[in-house]
Image (cartoon, rainbow, N blue to C red):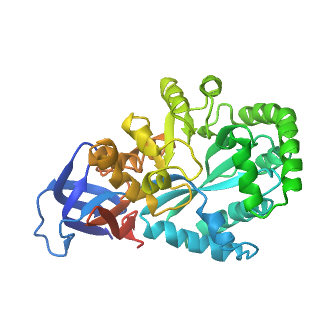
Amino acid sequence: MTDETILTNARLVLPERVETGTILLRDGLIAEIAPGRSAAPGAVDLEGDFLIPGVVDVHTDNLERQVLPRSQARWPSVSAFLSHDSQVAVAGVTTVLDALCLGDLGFDESRLQTARDGVRDLGALTEAGVLKSEHLLHLRCELPATDMLPMLEEFHTDPHLRMVSLMDHTPGVGQYADPDRYRAMRVKGGRPVAEVERRMAELTAQREAWSGPNRRALLSLFEGRDVPLATHDDWDPVIVGHNAADGIRISEFPVNMESARAARAHGMAVIAGAPNLVRGGSHSGNVSAADLAREGLVDIIASDYVPPAMIEAAWRLPREAGMPLSAAVATITANPARALGLADRGQIAPGLRADLVRIREFGDMPVVQAVWRGGMRIA
């Protein structure tokens, strides 16, 4: 039996334009797109609301936030995963890469358990068919960590793996290029000053010993495989060039304008964080995503740690950077889908998956009204 849904009187955000029209969904796919309004019986009137493709989020730490909603209050893993799933679905995210951290740098030991539980739960819940959104795996690999490579060897063949990022959160480089800022953050988090000083020295030595060998081993594991590699918190344009020479094609959250420019010069896709755009700047003092967008240096927006920020960030780009709405929406739909090799989604076009989000504006704020994944209403 054919399953059909007609959505009409919608402002369709198409790849090149916004057009009021009608869309026919059939058996989970977009079957037809037509201008104007449909008089067909049963057509759903979207009352002039926007209709965009389902959001594709390449990086979210939101699962970690559900696992540890308060310090020392660890939540049961399956319950946390289902809560995470509900939150991303209602935010319009129909494809989400759960970013799980491999490797302990001495201050976030519980993240390793979250990673192991998360990989297990993702597979089991997907197989059971109980998840609203489609969940895939993004492995965040701490190159200086002594335990990163054994964990990666455990998970690198997981069938849900879609992206791997090379990270270095050593004080003095990347996001933490300012050691004083790093020190203050750890002390504010409740760590004794002496412990922080000792651990900072250990991490610097650890980076010298382990980053190079771990990097080479990681690159070898993924050589010739169809798994996109990204670098995280790029901060040095020279290092960006080395990354590009190693076949890395994505620069995730570059911390300064110079590194973003270098990534673009080397043909890398640049990811910016949605919270950076929504809040009007980086929470850690890095380059403003709006400034990157104004220079044409934002290809993809990721939720980072706030899934509802995705659509709001895209809606801000026309005001902040002068982008057409269709191009702004592409940063959370078509562009991430393309970077991940997901050719069956990311645009409103015949033959693609019927992953769709209905949005009504409240002033300048986009408000999600309904979400479909594969033609099925999920929120």
User: Total marks drawn?
Assistant: 0
Q: Quadrant of residue 361?
A: bottom left
Q: Identify the residue shown where x is 76% and y is 40%.
A: 143
Q: Identify the residue shown where x is 16% and y is 58%.
A: 21
Q: Identify the residue shown where x is 37% and y is 52%.
A: 314
- Residue 261 vs residue 315: left or right? right
Q: In front here: 265 or 379?
A: 265
Q: Quadrant of residue 243?
A: top right
Q: In front here: 118 or 211?
A: 211
- Residue 101 vs residue 269: left or right? right
Percent x, y for residue 48?
18, 65
18 is higher (above) or lower (below) than 51: above
Percent x, y for residue 275?
49, 55
- Residue 251 vs residue 296: left or right? right
User: Is residue 352 among the parts visible in the rendering?
Assistant: no
Percent x, y for residue 350?
28, 50
161 is higher (above) or lower (below) than 81: above
Q: Quadrant of the C terminus?
A: bottom left
142 is higher (above) or lower (below) than 186: above
Q: In front here: 169 or 76?
A: 169
Q: Quadrant of the N terminus?
A: bottom left
User: Is residue 203 among the parts visible in the rendering?
Assistant: yes
- Residue 343 vs residue 44: left or right? right
147 is higher (above) or lower (below) than 379: above
Percent x, y for residue 343?
43, 44
